[in-house]
Image (tube, rainbow, N blue to C red):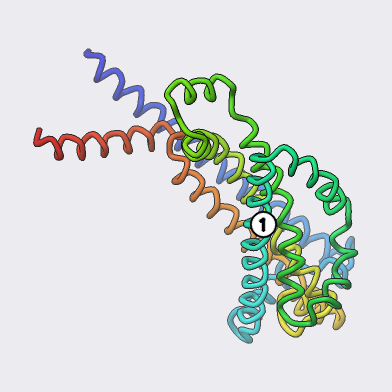
Amino acid sequence: MSNDQEASISNIELNAQYTGSLGGAVIRHTLIFFVVMFIWEMANRTGFSNPLLLPRPTDIAASIWKIYVTQGNVWYHLWVTFQEAMLGCLIGSVIGIALAVAAVLSDSFRQFLKPYIIIVEATPRIALGPIFVTWFGFGMSSKVALAALVCFFAPFVNTITGLLGVQEESYELFRSLGATRRQVFWRLMIPTALPTMNAGLKLAVGSAFGGALVAEFISAQAGMGILMARYTMSLNMPSAFAGLLSITLYGFLLFRTMEVIDKRVLYWLDDDLMAKKSAKREIKYRQELGL
């Protein structure tokens, strides 16, 4: 058997093993989910838990169908919260990354900025909610501002950590090749810091909904926060849990979307994607040379 055949058989075995482990994980988590739901349901029906405080899973499922299909009132509120969260995430991430880049490029600015960043991070976000509502009003601005504050810190810290984490040997290599400061920044520092920066952006996306919801709980005309508050005040706990699960699901989907984007952008960290990229470049190079 040739080396190529042996390599192909090894790849097939590895892929089969990975597929099997993934399928097994899905089955295990599905079984755990149904077991937990069954115990939860039985605890309610047998009187071990109060349905008013912890509604039955079947009632929550019925409420999900009601707010999404029968009434359909959840879509508008989801869209409002999504807009507030994503706009706040964008503003907070841009400010955080910009300040981090400036702090890395200037030691004096980094020392000047450090105590203010510590103060901002030490301040409870929830305590700022009423103040932001007073400053920015009862509309979308206060929700976006609080979401931006919540999303600021992770991109800021991760960008600084990534940019300052470049090895000295890499700097020496670029200097020996005569690279300018701009080339060192764009060709060395940014590619090296991208994995850490993207991790900060994923954390920001995951926490954006929390900032928007806190402001909506304080004062809002629309959004998932005010919708859930209305359900809890009327003791409609199944619908409140349905709204909570909706926010959790959308946050999870956004986080997974960021992971997919992360994998595509940072293709050099994945051997398979790197091999495909190299093959495409080789084909393009051969076509340009007429080979």
Residue 41 point in image, percent of width and height? 76, 62
Badge 1: few (under 14), some or many (20 or more) residues near its Cα, within 10 Å?
some
Residue 204 point in image, percent of width and height? 67, 54
**Residue underneath mark 1:** 95
Residue in the foreground of this view, choosing between 213 and 160? 160
Q: Relative to 155, does residue 64 appear above or below in the rendering?
A: below
Residue in the foreground of this view, choosing between 95 and 123? 95
Quarter containing the C terminus: top left
> For residue 178, which quarter of the picture?
top left
Residue in the foreground of this view, choosing between 80 and 179? 179
Residue 194 point in image, percent of width and height? 55, 41
Residue sitting at x 64%, y 43%: 159
Residue 133 point in image, percent of width and height? 83, 76
Residue in the foreground of this view, choosing between 234 and 260? 260
Q: For numbered disc 1, what is the local secondary structure?
A: helix
Residue sitting at x 47%, y 41%: 266
Is 222 on the left-hand or right-hand side of 276?
A: right
Amino acid under disc 1: Ile
Q: Relative to 267, does residue 219 appear above or below in the rendering?
A: below
Is 250 on the left-hand or right-hand side of 24?
A: right
> For residue 47, which quarter of the picture?
bottom right
Quarter containing the N terminus: top left
Q: Residue furthest left?
A: 290
Residue sitting at x 69%, y 43%: 103
Residue 270 visible in the snapshot: yes
Residue 205 visible in the snapshot: no
